[in-house]
Amino acid sequence: MTTSSVPAGDQDLAAFIAGLPKAELHVHHVGSASPRIVAELAARHPDSKVPADPEVLADYFTFRDFAHFIEVYLSVVDLIRTPEDVRLLTYEVARDMARQNIRYAELTITPYSSVRRGIPAEAFLEAIEDARKAAEAELGTVLRWCFDIPGEAGLESAAVTCDIAVDQAPEGLVSFGLGGPEIGVPRPQFKPYFDRARAAGLHSVPHAGETTGPQTIWDALTELGAERIGHGTSAVQDPRLLAHLAEHRIPLEVCPTSNIATRAVATLDEHPVKEMVAAGVLVTVNSDDPPMFGTDLNTEYAVTARLLGLDAAGVAALAKNAVTASFLDEAGKSRLAAEIDAYTAARS
């Protein structure tokens, strides 16, 4: 759709979203690699099956189902083989965020994937921390880390991830997560690792209820001490669960386009975000693996605004939800919320 064919009101809202200061809470490190960066990494590692042509990557990033998405995702993970690859990827992700006026992001990182491919944990951590500090100083985007367990790799990956998170905790680390497939990967088995991470002061933010039912979300809450839920798409199937999430102000990290791309939801118009909001749940908008899904955070705000019928003020309120749900300190939350308010007032 060309800009000239977009209704003027939609154009105005898109412009408002583009300039809006934002926080993002559910976005993956490798999954944020732009086609340009993926192609550059693929050219460095010609033994990979990932195309080294940015134009071809659009077809490569078309997924049959969630299992195929995981397969493609892991093939891109395999391109991150040296500390230099890690540093390049991390800084370039921050650059893309800065272009969208993302002021703060909690980036989900899977150190196990790189460590098992031969990058020493110390070198991996040094690379992401160097990129984080440079991004904040040069781009104005503040990054924090969520170290997540790749569920498909089993309990060994949980132990390694927990050891790195607790014993070598980098300065930017704030939370501990669990990603990968849900089917066949029950949440309760990871309880000891979440207990240890939480005892060390890390927040619990597992994925749950994306491709499985509400019980997975209950397990994340009761067994893993979840403070936020990644996706939580199936929560709307259980009114008691929705009421619990609303009462206890447990946010959902909603990623609409991702849910369509992985076939977790059939169509955008069927996305359950409307029911979540109607139930009083604190909803945040996120992009998950944006280049892989042909999206970015600005697009996800526009999509969600359409689904919820929001104007600029409603979109700004959504942006403040992410600030509220973030693990920023109170002073940081106040500053970013004030920036959102000032921007909104200036545009009204």
Image: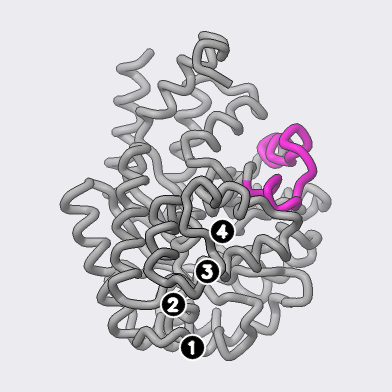
In the rendered structure, which disc, 2 or 1, sits on the residue that comes first in sequence? 2
Q: Is residue 276 left or right of residue 338?
A: right
User: Which residue position is annotated with label 2?
Assistant: 111
User: Which residue position is annotated with label 4?
Assistant: 228
Q: Quadrant of residue 337?
A: top left
Q: Which residues are the magenta region?
A: 258-278
Q: What main secondary structure does the magenta stretch of the protein show?
A: helix
Cβ–Cβ below 8 Å for labels 1 and 3? no
In percent of width and height, residue 52 lies at: 46, 58
Q: Is residue 74 left or right of residue 14?
A: right
Q: In front: mark 3 or mark 2?
A: 2
Q: In front: mark 4 or mark 1?
A: 1
Q: How is the image coloured?
A: one colour
Residue 217 shows in the view: no
Q: In front: mark 2 or mark 4?
A: 2
In the rendered structure, which disc, 3 or 2, sits on the residue that comes first in sequence? 2
Distance, label 3 to label 2, CA atoms, is: 17 Å
Distance, label 3 to label 4, CA atoms, is: 7 Å
Distance, label 2 to label 1, CA atoms, is: 9 Å
Q: Amino acid at mark 2?
A: Pro
